[in-house]
Image (tube, helix red, strand yellow):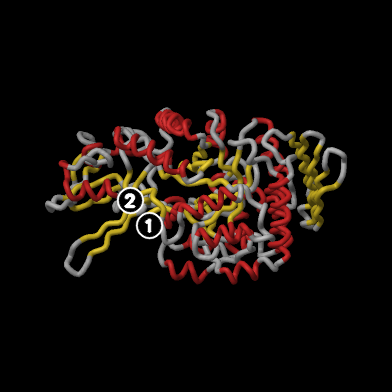
Amino acid sequence: MNKSNWGPMLNAYPDSLGGTLADAVEFLREDAVRGAFSSFYILPSLFHTDLDRGFSVIDYGLEESLAKKEDLQDLQALGIDVKLDFILNHLSVQSPQFQDLLEKGDASAYKDFFIDWNKFWAGCGNVNEEGVLVPRQEYIQDMFFRKPGLPVLVVEFADGTKRPYWNTFYQQVDVDETGKKHYLGQMDVNIQSPQVLDFYRQTLATLAAYGAKIVRLDAFAYAPKEVGAKNFLNDPGTWNFLEQIAQMAQPYGVALLPEIHASYQEGTYRTIAQKGYMVYDFFLPGLVLDALEQKSGETLAAWAKEIVDSGMKTVNMLGCHDGIPLLDLKGLLPEERIQGLIDTLVSRGGFVKDLHGAKNVYYQVNATYYSALGEDDRRMLLARALQLFMPGKPQVWYLDLFAGKNDYAAMKRAGAGGHKEINRTNLSKEDMARGLQQPVVQNQLALLQARASFPVFAEDAAISVQAQGSRLQFVWEKDAQRAQLDADLATCGFSACLTDAHGKVVFSMEQ
């Protein structure tokens, strides 16, 4: 991670703020906003995609209706670098590679680019009436499934033959009036193929050329596959694969952010940190909510101290395009506290997302962070202050910045499986103009501008954290400069004060 940019990062889709990336750039230029962000995590509908709001990539060219190269250049001119997604595990059915395979079959240059399910499991089971090889229980009893049934999509080739391909995540099959099937799906790629490795190299070069300084590795833990393995976070296969990607990325000077949800007690975050990668702090959203509900900063302080003492480099967040993570809290909070948190968030209008369709195995709650906080401005501002004083690089979901409420209409429009749309409302220019008049928005921006502009908030600053009952204190120190946050979780009162090397107060805020 570039030491010169440890400042706040905006997070949005290219069409979240006004309709296009150009509109988002215009927003970032506004006097009220300018200087609040030094990075922008633009979600992958920036590229040519067709499913899962961007995470089913056709190719990594820019979606010109939403974004142009000039927009990315304008961000750089503002001093804002970007974080972009690289979806390692899969490509869309509509990708040129899979379409070539469908047309030409075994004559395709891409015949080994994707994973022929039956070929992968040859000799390990029997083919059923649908032509899908069902592996014997001994081979899949420990396998991790993202959805019910085998992770396959049976596709029909141009010559009428059918074949199942590995499909871990989403799929959709539509039949037109002639009876012809049309496929959408995120098709797993074969990382044993030299063509796939070449594709990875080309993609990293493309992302770096767009101005990416951080590349988020989406679904990386599903990519390495072995017969009889869990096929999620295989050890050592996953780590060997990650090192391979790191070697490819090195010439481009990008930092890699492996994205993975795993419980605290499993310790996967520690392994990622020890291997020298940035860690996605999926613990913070739930810990801040828990601290406010319990009126105690003890657990939050303990996590902050662990980050500091271990030297791990984190990207943290409150809300995001997904839900509020809860599975991650196992081992950090007692089970009854996690369940109590779930009940509270549901009572405030959130929806529980169970783990891969398994009932009563919680994974996340879908809600805006503002609604999860009870739509309370004081809580929202305190939550933001806590995030900005936590060690790490803060990532800010655009809708949280505007104190966005749960969008039930969007959820209803999306239909079955549309729960995530509750926290993805696209804001018009008029919405943003109104939002910038709200004190909770103005105060968040003031905190963000302070966090972005004062050099005390540096990767190598000395950070201390103290908690006593409902009181919580963060102190950052560097080169005789000091930033201090004193918060009372019982009253949601806080004071933030920054002093320069001469002891002069250069920023203060109280609530």
Q: Give the answer, above or below, for where 350 lies relative to 249.
A: below
Q: CA distance from mark 2 to mark 1?
A: 8 Å
Splitting the image into 4 quarters, where does residue 145 fall? top left
Is residue 291 among what the camera can see?
Answer: yes
Splitting the image into 4 quarters, where does residue 465 fall? top right
Label placed on residue 92: 2
Category of crowding for the residue at label 1, using alpha-carbon neighbours closer than 10 angstroms: few (below 14), some (14–19), many (at least 20) = some
Please state if 321 lies on the left or on the right of 396 as rendered. left
Could you tell me which residue is drawn at 80 percent across and 46 percent down? Answer: 498
On the image, the x and y values in percent for residue 327 come to 53, 47
Is residue 235 among what the camera can see?
Answer: no
Could you tell me which residue is drawn at 56 percent across and 36 percent down? Answer: 278
On the image, the x and y values in percent for residue 446 come to 73, 56
Q: Disc 2 marks which amino acid?
A: Ser
Judge by depth and name the residue closer to the eye, 373 or 138. 373
Label 2: state its secondary structure.
Answer: strand
Quadrant in which the N terminus is drawn? top right
Comes first in the chain, label 2 or label 1: 1
Whether tag 2 and tag 1 are in contact, CB under 8 A, the answer is: yes
Q: Give the answer, above or below, for where 494 lies relative to 350.
A: above
